Structures are given as C-alpha cells and as structure tokens.
Image: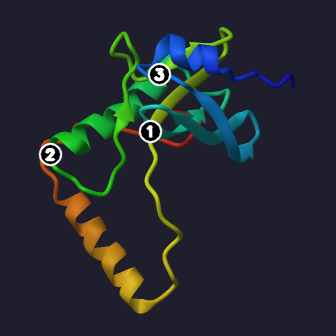
Amino acid sequence: MEETELTKELIEQNWPLTGVQIGELLRRSGGSRVGIIESNEGRYIYKIAHTWKTSTTIERDLTAFDFLNSVGFKHISRLLKTKRNKSHVVMNNDKLIYLIEYVKGDHPNSSVATYSELGRITGVLHSIQGCLLYTSPSPRD
C-alpha cells in the first residue's frame, strides 16, 4: 500500500494554523496514522482514519467531540475545525484526516485509585442526557 504524504501545506491550506511542522509519528496501524502537528497556534494531534472509514462515518463519529464539549464534559479533547468549519478533510481523494488539541500527559498508573477515577468518569459519561450519537469502531457499521 502506498503511503499518503501529509504536508505542512495541506494542513495550513485547510486548518487555521500557521508555521506548521509535521512532528513525531506516534502510531501506525494498517492504513491509519496518528502523529503530532506543531504550529504557531499550538500543538495538535492529527489522525488519518482507517481506509474503511467514509466521510459519512467519520463525520458521524466526530460529532461526539462537539456534543461532549457542548455539555461540559471535561475529559475530551477539542476537535479543530477546518477553515470551512468542517470536522475533517479528504486527503489525496482517499484518506480522511482530522485534528484534535494535544493534551499533555502520560498514561495513568495501574492502581485502584486510577481505576476508581476512570469508573467515576465513565459514570459521568453514561449519565449525560440528550446524546443521540451512534459511533462504532467496526468496518461493518
């Protein structure tokens, strides 16, 4: 499979960012990639979706960012909208890419306190009313 090149020009052309530098590649899995974008406006994470994702499914999935931020859920990054107020861009006619704010931190320690806090956060998430979103990690949906 041919690698799709992510360029600073593509990012600056589509998102309200300047002085872009493509940073470290954090993860690669099949056709998807996750990495860092450095810019004058801050640090962001880029995500290039798996090849089975379509514009419709990625748009549906990404609405969760806006919804959860709109109800004050503190444990989710903000999605950076494009200059055209879209959630993602189609790159080279076949790859879907989106940007989210970078959140500094490390993986939490495996401890009773950590799992207790994760359980509390999950409870808050499940108690949010008015969410009519359906997201799925499956290529069959």
Q: Secondary structure at mark 1?
A: strand
Q: Who is closer to the viewer here, 120 or 140?
A: 120
Q: Quadrant of the N terminus?
A: top right
Q: Residues within 10 Å of mark 2 (few under 14, many from 20)?
A: few
Q: Alpha carbon of mark 2 to alpha carbon of mark 3: how far? A: 22 Å
**Residue 72 falls left or right of residue 52:** left
Q: Residue at x 45, y 19 (%)?
A: 15
Q: Which residue is mark 3?
A: 88
Amino acid type shown at disc 2: Val
Amino acid type shown at disc 3: His
Q: Who is closer to the viewer here, 6 or 66?
A: 6
Q: Secondary structure at mark 2?
A: loop
Q: Image quarter for residue 52?
A: top right
Q: Residue at x 49, y 22 (%)?
A: 18
**Residue 116 falls left or right of residue 18:** left
Amino acid type shown at disc 1: Gly
Tell me residue 85's x, y (percent). 33, 15
- Give the mark, 1 or 3, whose residue is nearer the N terminus: 1
Residue sitting at the far bottom? 112
Q: Alpha carbon of mark 2 to alpha carbon of mark 1: how far? A: 24 Å
Tell me residue 26's x, y (percent). 68, 49
Q: Which residue is mark 2?
A: 71
Q: Which mark is residue 85?
A: none
Q: Residues within 10 Å of mark 1 (few under 14, many from 20)?
A: few
Residue sitting at the far right? 1
Residue contact at pointers 1 and 3, CB within 8 angstroms: no
Q: Alpha carbon of mark 1 to alpha carbon of mark 3: how far? A: 18 Å
